[in-house]
């Protein structure tokens, strides 16, 4: 054995030899790897080996932090202890092995305990102490950055693939309907939608597109929906205090306005908006994005979209905006409260008109400069726009009060009937409706009615006679049928039924011109032929040569001479107003005096079917006319509307050419005309017939005894007719100049719809007048309105009436034709022949022709049947009184005018004030 082996005999370490060392090196590491502390000795080294003695008590494990601290203390302290082999042995020295010197535990070095495993995230840092322990290493920082960057990119990629472009938001589609006056200025916006009218991309001018691009998003045509550089510029410019572009791109604004219902300012919505914008930018056409943005953006003044804004600020369509106007609208997009030149001091004291104008001017000028820099506006054109554009004053939010509601109701009915647009279509909105209504004329008609209401109608003073008084009116262009004005009542939000439309008020004597037109067009029937006759068997009536009896309580006969009997078999006796009786009179004179008897009999001679057809041909609706063949039909027991009456009279003014009244010229949607009115002119009457009717109606106004003389307009040709109904329950005046036809009606009817069995009420004493005739308030309103309304037309005369071809003098109703004054035939003398050579002859006895004599007929015993006109002023059955027999005083063959005629000359008949009644005396 060598010396070396003798000096270093092999020994097993106290800890158990090599196997024990290996086991010690393989002890578990980690949070719970440290053994329990040595309770008996308290030495730190005892925590890492077996108990020092078999019976020694072991301390329980501490917490994780305590285990780490114990392990660290053990490493430091054991390094100074020598192992069994001394300093040079297997565990000796500071870096000794498994056991050391006097102690039994491992040393500080690698030989003292097994090395710890390296953590993936070395934080807090291993082997560092104090503040260095908490300072992350560059590897950790770099790794963390790369990890999160990769994670975000991955999440973004997943989100991008998963996100879907939502459908257009309902709010973005929400639109209202805009109604315009005839001059294309805005009347009112209606419906539940937003004040918006969507226009297609092609209708948006380039100047408007370029203005918002230069102001908001210069890279719009090239970016992917978001613009990080633009956001950076916005932040930088904001920091410098200069003009800024928006941080959001036009695409993002489009997504926000057009694709998202959620408008909350939350991070989640912003993130969602970002991803949708990226996808929209890559998948949706840029033209669609631009149009969508400009159609949904808010411009102030309640205007959403460029079309509504163009109307609100400049009263033009969007397609007509110039670069200067476009720049201002782009400026307003920054915030209407502070950039609308009108100002909003009620919202913010800083938003005064002066300050807003200054701000708007600065931004407007800056946008124009940017447009020039970006190549959107040539320098020469930029130089034109040095003056701030003229801006319309803000209009108050229009509503349906006053006459507006009636105008809208009429227009809606027109487009439904004419264009087939449904109520559901209108509810969805988006229509621009261009009406025929002229604001000046509408205001003038309302003013004329208001004057009478304020001056004469006093419900507080005369509650029994002045309550529930209603007026209605309509004015129609005679050449086209355009409804240029109407009066529907005091206020559409208080009185809901339009008095210009069907009200149930009967028209009275204003119906007589249709009887005359039928007589001149179709003629009266031959008494010797059957009831149905063609024109070859009829006689055309000359209004000046023909004569009819104006007798009061005239027995009305059928065309063949038989007396008309009502359903109860009683004779029909026709009365005149106030029981006035007239001589035989021409049809012109009967129209001037508004005598009833002549026109009732004329209607029977012509045929009620022909009268009805003439009224319909002139323009009245068939469903507004009563059925049956009763004589009173010719006296206006039907109830057409004021609109239709004005339109029918316009047919006569237009020389027999008829156009249905209409109130809508065109309808647009998204800036495109989808419906346009197309005239459908009919010619139911020849110019000769129409002009002769006009000439007769002209006499009603111009004659000193005419019932319509109060309707004269200095310097203008006027034709018209008054009408008053039985029981004094309605009164009319319908008249026209060569260019304009107008109907005005007046009646009393309770507005309270909750009441049952509402009826028309008498107007005796209304307005402190004994009786209301068409020649009173209706004529005055007509004259006052028309005097102003015709100022927009040049003075024009009616055509001179030509002679009716084949017209004859017709005598009806018992009227006799003029005969020469009778003279007696001389009495012959008897002579005796002088005798001659020839045989005498005897002259036969002379004959004497007796002179013509006038006989007084016996009084006729007459009755007033339920189909005849009333013998008294009390309401009766249609066309007559109670039906009790009456006697008439003796008359002569040449009747004389009796009674005191009124201005209107209309007679009473069957009233409409009680159930079962309904006939009128116009």
Image (spheres, rainbow, N blue to C red):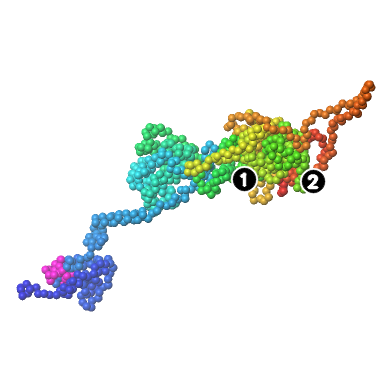
Relative depth, front residue between 632 and 27: 632
Residue 881, image x, y percentages: 76, 44
Residue 382, image x, y percentages: 39, 34
Give the foreground label among 1 and 2. Answer: 2
Residue sitting at the far front: 838
Q: Is residue 570 left or right of residue 378?
A: right
User: Compared with residue 804, is residue 101 higher up or lower down, i.e. above or below?
Assistant: below
Residue density around tag 1, few if under 14, some if 14–19, many if 20 or more, within 10 Å: some
Q: Is residue 694 left or right of residue 270?
A: right
Residue 533 appears in which quarter of the rendering? top right
Which residue does the image show at 52% across and 38% down from the upper left? 185
Residue 11 appears in which quarter of the rendering? bottom left
Say what secondary structure mark 1 lies in.
Answer: loop
Residue 843 appears in which quarter of the rendering? top right
Write down the residue under mark 2: 884
Residue sitting at the far bottom: 55
Q: Main secondary structure of the magenta part?
A: loop
Q: Can you see residue 475? A: no
Q: Earlier in the sequence, mark 1 or mark 2?
A: 1
Relative depth, front residue between 871 and 496: 871
Q: Can you see residue 127? A: yes
Residue 515, image x, y percentages: 69, 38
Q: Is residue 90 left or right of residue 906?
A: left
Relative depth, front residue between 106 and 749: 749
- Name the quadrant of the N terminus: bottom left
Which residue does the image show at 35% across and 56% down from the upper left? 158
Instruction: Specify start and end residues of the magenta stretch as a single range.
Output: 85-106
Residue density around tag 2, few if under 14, some if 14–19, many if 20 or more, within 10 Å: some
Which residue does the image show at 93% across and 24% down from the upper left? 839
Write down the residue under mark 1: 497
- Name the quadrant of the C terminus: top right
């Amino acid at each position: 054995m060598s010396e070396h082996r003798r000096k270093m005999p092999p020994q097993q370490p106290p800890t158990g030899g090599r196997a024990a060392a290996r086991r010690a090196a393989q002890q578990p590491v980690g949070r719970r790897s440290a053994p329990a502390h040595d309770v008996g000795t308290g030495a730190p080294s005892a925590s890492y080996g077996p108990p020092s003695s078999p019976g020694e008590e072991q301390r329980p494990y501490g917490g994780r932090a305590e285990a780490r601290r114990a392990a660290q203390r053990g490493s430091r302290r054991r390094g100074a202890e020598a192992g069994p082999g001394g300093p040079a042995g297997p565990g000796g020295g500071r870096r000794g092995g498994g056991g050391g010197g006097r102690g039994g535990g491992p040393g500080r070095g690698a030989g003292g305990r097994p090395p710890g495993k390296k953590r993936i995230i070395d934080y807090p840092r291993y082997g560092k102490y104090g503040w260095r322990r908490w300072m992350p290493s560059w590897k950790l920082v770099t790794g963390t950055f790369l990890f999160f960057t990769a994670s975000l990119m991955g999440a973004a990629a997943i989100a991008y693939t998963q996100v879907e472009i939502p459908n257009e938001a309902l709010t973005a589609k929400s639109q209202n309907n805009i109604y315009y006056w005839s001059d294309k200025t805005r009347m009112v916006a209606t419906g539940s939608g937003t004040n918006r009218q969507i226009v297609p991309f092609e209708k948006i001018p380039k100047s408007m597109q370029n203005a918002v691009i230069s102001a908001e998003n210069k890279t719009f045509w090239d970016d992917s929906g978001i613009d990080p550089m633009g956001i950076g510029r916005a932040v930088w410019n904001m920091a410098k205090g200069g003009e800024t572009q928006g941080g959001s791109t036009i695409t993002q604004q489009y997504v926000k306005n057009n694709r998202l219902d959620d408008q909350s300012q939350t991070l989640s919505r912003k993130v969602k908006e970002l991803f949708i914008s990226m996808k929209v930018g890559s998948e949706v056409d840029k033209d669609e994005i631009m149009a969508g943005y400009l159609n949904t953006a808010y411009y102030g003044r309640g205007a959403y979209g460029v079309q509504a804004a163009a109307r609100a600020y400049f009263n033009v369509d969007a397609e007509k905006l110039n670069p200067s106007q476009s720049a201002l609208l782009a400026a307003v997009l920054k915030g209407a409260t502070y950039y609308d030149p009108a100002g909003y001091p009620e919202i913010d004291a800083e938003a005064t008109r002066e300050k807003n104008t200054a701000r708007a001017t600065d931004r407007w000028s800056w946008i124009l400069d940017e447009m020039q820099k970006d190549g959107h506006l040539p320098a020469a054109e930029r130089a034109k726009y040095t003056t701030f554009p003229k801006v319309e004053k803000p209009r108050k939010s229009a509503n349906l009060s006053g006459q507006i509601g009636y105008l809208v109701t009429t227009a809606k009915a027109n487009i439904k009937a004419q264009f087939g647009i449904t109520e559901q279509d209108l509810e969805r909105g988006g229509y621009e409706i261009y009406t025929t209504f002229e604001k000046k004329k509408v205001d003038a008609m309302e003013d004329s009615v208001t004057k009478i209401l304020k001056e004469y109608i006093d419900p507080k003073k005369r509650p029994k006679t002045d309550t529930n008084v209603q007026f209605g009116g309509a004015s129609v262009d005679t050449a086209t049928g355009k409804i240029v004005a109407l009066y529907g009542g005091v206020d559409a939000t208080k009185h809901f039924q339009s008095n210009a439309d069907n009200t149930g008020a009967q028209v009275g004597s204003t119906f007589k011109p249709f009887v005359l037109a039928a007589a001149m067009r179709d003629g009266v029937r031959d008494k010797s032929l059957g009831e149905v006759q063609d024109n070859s068997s009829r006689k055309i009536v000359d209004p000046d040569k023909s004569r009819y009896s104006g007798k009061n309580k005239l027995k009305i006969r059928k065309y063949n001479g038989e007396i008309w009997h009502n359903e109860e078999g009683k004779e029909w006796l026709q009365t005149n107003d106030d029981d006035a009786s007239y001589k035989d009179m021409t049809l012109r004179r009967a129209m001037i005096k508004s005598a009833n008897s002549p026109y009732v009999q004329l209607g029977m001679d012509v045929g009620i079917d022909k009268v009805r057809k003439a009224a319909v041909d002139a323009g009245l609706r068939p469903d507004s006319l009563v059925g049956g063949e009763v004589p009173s039909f010719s006296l206006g027991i039907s109830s057409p509307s004021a609109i239709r009456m004005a339109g029918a009279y316009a047919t006569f003014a237009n020389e027999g050419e008829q156009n249905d009244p209409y109130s809508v010229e065109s309808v647009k949607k998204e800036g495109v005309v989808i419906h346009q009115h197309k005239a459908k002119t009919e010619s139911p009457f020849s110019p000769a017939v129409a002009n002769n009717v006009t000439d007769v109606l002209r006499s009603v106004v111009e004659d000193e005894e005419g019932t319509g003389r109060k309707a004269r307009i200095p310097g203008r040709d006027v034709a018209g007719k008054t009408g008053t109904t039985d029981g004094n329950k309605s009164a009319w005046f319908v008249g026209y100049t060569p260019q304009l036809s107008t109907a005005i009606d007046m009646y009393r009817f309770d507005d309270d719809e909750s009441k049952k069995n509402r009826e028309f009420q008498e107007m005796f004493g209304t307005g402190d007048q004994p009786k209301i005739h068409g020649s009173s308030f209706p004529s005055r309103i007509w004259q006052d309105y028309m005097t102003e309304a015709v100022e927009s037309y040049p003075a024009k005369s009616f055509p001179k009436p030509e002679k009716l071809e084949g017209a004859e003098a017709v005598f009806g109703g018992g009227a006799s034709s003029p005969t020469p004054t009778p003279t007696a035939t001389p009495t012959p003398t008897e002579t005796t022949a002088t005798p001659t050579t020839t045989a005498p002859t005897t002259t036969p006895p002379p004959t004497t022709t007796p002179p013509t004599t006038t006989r007084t007929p016996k009084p006729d015993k007459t009755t007033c049947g339920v189909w005849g006109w009333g013998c008294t002023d009390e309401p009766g059955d249609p066309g007559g009184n109670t039906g009790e027999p009456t006697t008439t005083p003796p008359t002569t063959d040449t009747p004389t005018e009796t009674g005191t005629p009124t201005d209107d000359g209309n007679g009473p008949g069957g009233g409409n004030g009680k159930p079962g009644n309904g006939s009128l005396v116009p």
